Structure formats: C-alpha cells, structure tokens
Image (cartoon, helix red, strand yellow):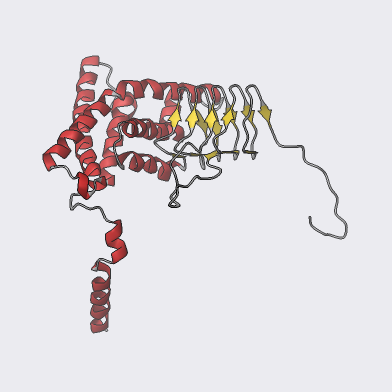
C-alpha cells in the first residue's frame, strides 16, 4: 500500500511540475517575483487606516499623535506599494520592453508617490459616499454604522484607490484590489469605471459596473444592478476591441434592484429606473422607467402558462 501511495504521488508530481506548452505561453516573460495578493490586502488595510483613522485604529483625539500614526501608515504604504507596483511592472513587461531592476523600482517609486498624492482627494470622495448612504437609507442610525457595516464603503475604498492606480497606468494591481472587494462583498466594479461623488449602493450583492461605465454625482444603485455591455466590436483579426461599451449614468439617477442597463447608452439626469428592467436605449432626463402592470390570467384544468 505504501509503495502504491509513493508511486502515485511521484507520478503526479512529475506530471504537475512539467511545464506544458500552454502553461509556458501564459506565464510572464520574466523570472521576477509576481505581485502578492496578501501584500495587496495589507496595502488596502493601510489605506483604510489612513482614510478612516478613528474607525480602523485606536481612536486618538490628540491631533499631534493622530498625525504621527497617519504618517507611519503613509510611510509603510509607500514602501509596500512601491514593491508591489514594481512586481506588477515586471509581471506585465515583454521581452522588448524589459527594464533593469533599478529602472523598474525607480518607476514604481514614482508611481507610488503619485498614488500617495491622491489620498486627500480619495478621502474627500469617500466621505461623500458615506454621506450619500446615510441620506438614502432610513435604517441608518449614525455615520459610524455606515463606515463599519455597509459593504459599499468597503467596496468604494478598494475601488477609489484602485481607480487612481488605474489612471496612473499601474498594471494588474488595480484589478487585484477591486477583485478583493468583489470576493468579499459581491459588488464587482472594474477599476477603469468612472464614478462621481455622493455614490451609494444599497445592499449591494450582485452589482456589476463595467470598465467603461461613467457614473455622475448623487447616483444610487440597488442590489443586482448591472451596468454592462450589450455587444462587442472586433478588429480585422477577430480580437475584441476595448472601446466604450458600457452605460453613461448622469447625475441624480436611481436604479432599483436587478435592473440591467446595457450598451453605450445614456440614462438622463434625475431619472428613476425600476427593478427588473432591461434597458438598451437612451433614457431622457427626468424619466421614470418601470415594468408594465401584471396582467391577471386564469387557468382551467390545472394547466400552467
């Protein structure tokens, strides 16, 4: 029996450790370390502590002490972010564009410093999101409840930081960040999407916001909303083109649960989209789109529809 166990293990280890042609084709072209999901989690934890220091750290009323702890976290964030951006750059570079290790870390350090410079604006935007949730949900008793408990806040911390990295053309790391939020909350926001201030998602599970979506200010979504693509465009070789293909949602729009807004269409400002609606055409401002009323029907002989 022991011989069979060893033979089985050795046979499968040999098969699994052999690099297949398909595996080689999918691997990065450098031997550099890959980005670390665990380190990216630490990066987001630091961002939380910096943006909401009184909620995700011990509460500090003395501004000087508070400043010290925020400073420590910013320094640590810069260090971790530089390293992970460097790994991301190495992960995505091709043989023609390989930098030296020094060049990679210099570029990563420059990008990480630019990301640090966006934190005050990210903080401002996130507090508008908290306000939007508070204003839209009568079940909320105080702001702390929103920050601690609502999945949209956790998601938007990930998204807003990832979006800034995406704007800086940082590879791979923004997707890791938003997918961490997706796996935890069920809210899937691509870091390339553009979302204005005072953004609220109630409940949140199943919300999907595609890469080229544009969302204005004071927009509220409910669970299950999809801002997706209706179809794709291809080049002459049959490859999918990355062109605008997701909706534009203007200011003061509310979209109720399980609505699907598809294609590069515009939902005009101050509109309300009802639940379980499939929208594939432009909607003018101040519109109210809802399902038709149910039509009552009777059945004879126990027959179904």
- The residue at 45%/49% (across/down) is 236
Please identify the quadrant where the C terminus is shown: bottom right
- Left or right: 132 in relation to 102: right
- The residue at 19%/39% (across/down) is 83
- The residue at 27%/28% (across/down) is 115
Q: Position of residue 93 (x, y in %)?
A: 24, 45
- Left or right: 287 in relation to 26: right
- The quarter holding residue 44 reads top left
Report the number of discs.
0
Front-lying residue, 297 or 18? 18
Q: Position of residue 54 (x, y in %)?
A: 32, 24
Q: Is residue 17 above or below residue 128?
A: below
- The quarter holding residue 151 reads top left
Q: Is residue 260 above or below residue 135?
A: below
Q: Residue furthest front?
A: 236
| Residue 122 visible to the viewer | yes
| Residue 141 visible to the viewer | no
Front-lying residue, 142 or 150? 150
Q: Residue furthest top?
A: 63
- The residue at 27%/56% (across/down) is 27
Q: Position of residue 2 (x, y in %)?
A: 24, 82
- Left or right: 179 in relation to 49: right
Q: Position of residue 8 (x, y in %)?
A: 27, 78
Q: Is residue 109 above or below residue 131?
A: below
Please identify the quadrant where the N terminus is shown: bottom left
Q: Residue furthest right?
A: 300
- The quarter holding residue 4 reads bottom left
Front-lying residue, 233 or 159? 233
């Amino acid at each position: 029996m022991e011989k069979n166990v060893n033979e089985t293990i050795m046979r499968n280890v040999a098969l699994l450790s052999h690099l297949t042609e398909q595996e080689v084709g999918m691997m990065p072209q450098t031997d550099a370390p890959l980005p670390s999901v665990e380190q990216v989690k630490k990066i987001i934890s630091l961002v939380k502590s910096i943006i909401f220091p009184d909620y995700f750290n011990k509460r500090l009323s003395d501004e000087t002490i508070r400043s010290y702890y925020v400073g420590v976290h910013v320094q640590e964030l810069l260090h971790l972010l530089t390293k992970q951006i460097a790994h991301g750059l190495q992960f995505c570079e091709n043989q023609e564009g390989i930098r030296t290790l020094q060049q990679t870390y210099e570029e990563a350090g420059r990008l990480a410093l630019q990301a640090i410079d966006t934190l005050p604006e990210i903080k401002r935007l996130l507090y508008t999101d908290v306000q939007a949730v508070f204003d839209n949900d009568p079940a909320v008793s105080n702001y702390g409840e929103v920050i601690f408990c609502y999945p949209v806040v956790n998601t938007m911390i990930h998204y807003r930081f990832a979006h800034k990295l995406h704007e800086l053309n940082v590879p791979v790391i923004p997707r890791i960040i938003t997918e961490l939020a997706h796996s935890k909350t069920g809210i899937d926001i691509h870091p390339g999407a553009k979302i204005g201030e005072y953004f609220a998602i109630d409940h949140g599970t199943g919300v999907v916001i595609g890469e080229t979506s544009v969302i204005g200010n004071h927009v509220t979504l409910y669970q299950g909303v999809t801002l997706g693509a209706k179809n794709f465009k291809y080049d002459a070789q049959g490859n999918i083109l990355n062109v605008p293909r997701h909706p534009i949602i203007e200011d003061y729009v509310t979209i109720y649960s399980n609505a699907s807004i598809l294609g590069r269409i515009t939902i005009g400002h101050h509109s309300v989209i009802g639940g379980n609606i499939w929208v594939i055409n432009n909607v003018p401002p101040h519109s109210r789109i809802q399902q038709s009323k149910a039509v009552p029907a009777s059945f004879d002989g126990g027959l179904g529809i």
